[in-house]
Image (cartoon, rainbow, N blue to C red):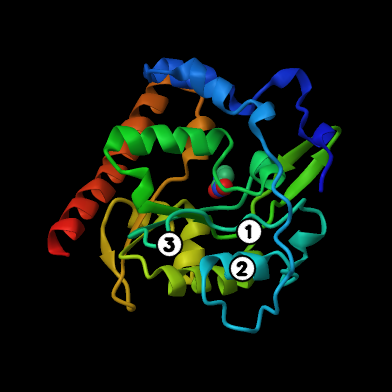
Amino acid sequence: MASVSRLSRPNGAFPHGRGAYIDLLGIAGARSMEAQVKKSELVLRAKPAPVVDPLTEAESLTALAAQEAGCTRCALYKNATQVVPGEGPPKARVLLIGEQPGDMEDLSGRPFVGPSGKLLDIALERAGVPRDKCFVTNAVKHFKFEPRGKRRLHRKPDAGEIDACRWWLDRERALLRPGLIVALGATAIRGALGRSEAVSRLRGEILDLDDGAQFLATVHPSSLLRLKDESDKRQAWRGFLADLRKIASWIEKDARAS
Ligand code: URA
């Protein structure tokens, strides 16, 4: 297991000035969000063991996570702390796909526990999307980074890494059988569709997939955290919430139909 000292972050600082961003948006609990991602909360998860033969069809998401722990399908496993499998109720009707684990996710073994995840949680709540109806995962399941002094800087996964990891995403989809698949950003779109499409081309439309599920693309929450201009931030936040409200409407319709 990784040592606790690996969790330390110089001065407890967080990237992207997230607190200021959240304050600007007037989101209640801005500072408590800062507190929520304190390193002391990161409980390192032991790597799932034993690692199971990945060629045997996993019959549950837990069994699948154990297989993922032994993944060597691309080189990213070599430097990551551990694989970060998807997480959520096995009967979730909505599958949310992110890009890849970040620093905190890599250390904790859980998806969306860092700054982007906290922003996503707030946005989902604001948009009226019940979190317990969502399974969250990533297109790429190992953290890709570049060491810079004591820090690990996020690097975007390339097409080969995304395609190699579709092996796992497809199995998650097969086990979960979600009615709606939501891609957060371009990497997630490639993971979900198997081809690259610009977020701007697909964004905000509920589309039908060949397997009977539906598909919605939106931006990745980290893109909001990177914005500097205040009016850009407000506009991006409104646009993101508008997309997420489509998930809330879809869930309501789905519940009525079943
Ligand atoms: N960003 C992602 O895309 N996924 C995570 O799990 C965390 C940050």
Judging depth in this view, the residue of 125 and 149 nearest the camera is 125
Question: Residue 213 appears at what percent x and percent y?
Answer: 31, 70
Circle 3 SS class:
loop
Location of residue 16 by image quarter: top right
Q: Are marks 3 and 1 in contact (CB under 8 Å)?
A: no
Residue denoted by label 3: 90
Q: 10 Å neighbourhood of mark 1: few (<14), some, or many (≥20)?
A: many
The residue shown at (74%, 47%) is: 145
- Identified by mark 3, the residue type is Pro
- Identified by mark 2, the residue type is Cys
Residue 141: assigned label: 1
The residue shown at (36%, 31%) is: 237
Residue 244 vs 53, above or below: the answer is above
Residue farthest along the front direction in this orientation:
50
Residue denoted by label 2: 165
Q: Are marks 2 and 1 in contact (CB under 8 Å)?
A: yes
The residue shown at (73%, 70%) is: 51
Distance of label 3 from label 1 (alpha carbons):
18 Å
Distance of label 3 from label 2 (alpha carbons):
20 Å
Question: Residue 127 appears at what percent x and percent y?
Answer: 28, 37
Question: Residue 232 appears at what percent x and percent y?
Answer: 40, 27
Mark 3 vs mark 2: give the one in front. 3
Which of disc 1 and disc 2 is earlier in sequence?
1
Q: 10 Å neighbourhood of mark 3: few (<14), some, or many (≥20)?
A: some
Location of residue 71 by image quarter: bottom right
The answer to whether one can see residue 29 in this image is yes
Residue farthest along the bottom direction in this orientation:
56
